[in-house]
Image (tube, coloured by chain):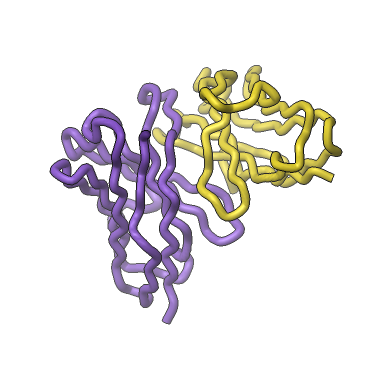
Amino acid sequence: QVQLVQSGAEVKKPGASVKVSCKASGYTFTGYYMHWVRQAPGQGLEWMGWINPNSGGTNYAQKFQGRVTMTRDTSISTAYMELSRLRSDDTAVYYCARNRGSSTSNWFDPWGQGTLVTVSS
Amino acid sequence: QSVLTQPPSVSGAPGQRVTISCTGSSSNIGAGYDVHWYQQLPGTAPKLLIYGNSNRPSGVPDRFSGSKSGTSASLAITGLQAEDEADYYCQSYDSSLFYVVFGGGTKLTVL
């Protein structure tokens, strides 16, 4: 079955970077864009960007440009999201989610289980 | 402040029908972009509930239905069950931002 398995929880200090992985299985990894979405404690969902696993092309939400880098390793069907210059308000659960649909009518299915990133001094 | 507006909470008794609204603007829902819905049970990742305004993925009960009109969309849940207690999010695309947007989420309480 289609599955996305993310790396484990992280605790980071302000100013540091974090890299979260998302391993895909059950489908052709390069055939579907991968999105990253985060959710701060008790808050809603916030879209961060996507990566095209085939070409490596990316598109980031303006809020995160300059701080986020999305990459992939097609040999192990894994996508990565790295966020730098971490602040306390970056504390959140980070999800990867497979894209479905077209460029302007796209939805997410399935989602990874989430990775909690805690930023604290 | 979310681009798509949802009520923070709704509630209903078991067996009843509830609706959750998702209001956008002329740059997203009103521009014709599809709306999708997700269910997030406590402590779990979101799960796709409705895609393309009104389509249910396999495995989603037909108690869940979606619709869209003008600059708004709605999720209806009939025959409420205790297991439906969760947060629900709408999602679309915004042509002025050039990316995906979510609603702020609605907490459904089954009384």
Residue closest to the eye, B24 or A3: A3
- Residue at the (36%, 25%) spot, across then down: A103
Residue at the far bottom: name it: A121
- Residue at the (61%, 31%) spot, across then down: B24
| Residue A67 appearing in the image | no
- Residue at the (52%, 59%) spot, across then down: A40
Residue closest to the eye, A76 or B100: A76
Q: Which chain is assigned purple? A: A
| Residue A69 appearing in the image | yes
Residue closest to the eye, B20 or A68: B20
* A62 vs B47: above or below: below
> Tag count in the figure?
0
* A74 vs B55: above or below: below
Residue B40, position as x, y percentages in the image: 59, 44
Say left or right for B67 vs B48.
right
* A116 vs B58: above or below: below
Say left or right for A61 vs B47.
left
Which quarter of the image is occupied by the C terminus of chain B? top right
Residue B58, position as x, y percentages in the image: 52, 23
- Residue at the (45%, 36%) spot, across then down: B100
Residue A73, position as x, y percentages in the image: 17, 46
Residue at the far front: name it: A1
Residue at the far left: name it: A75
- Quarter residue B106 falls in: top right
Q: Colour of chain B?
A: yellow
Residue A68, position as x, y percentages in the image: 30, 55
* B111 vs A103: above or below: below
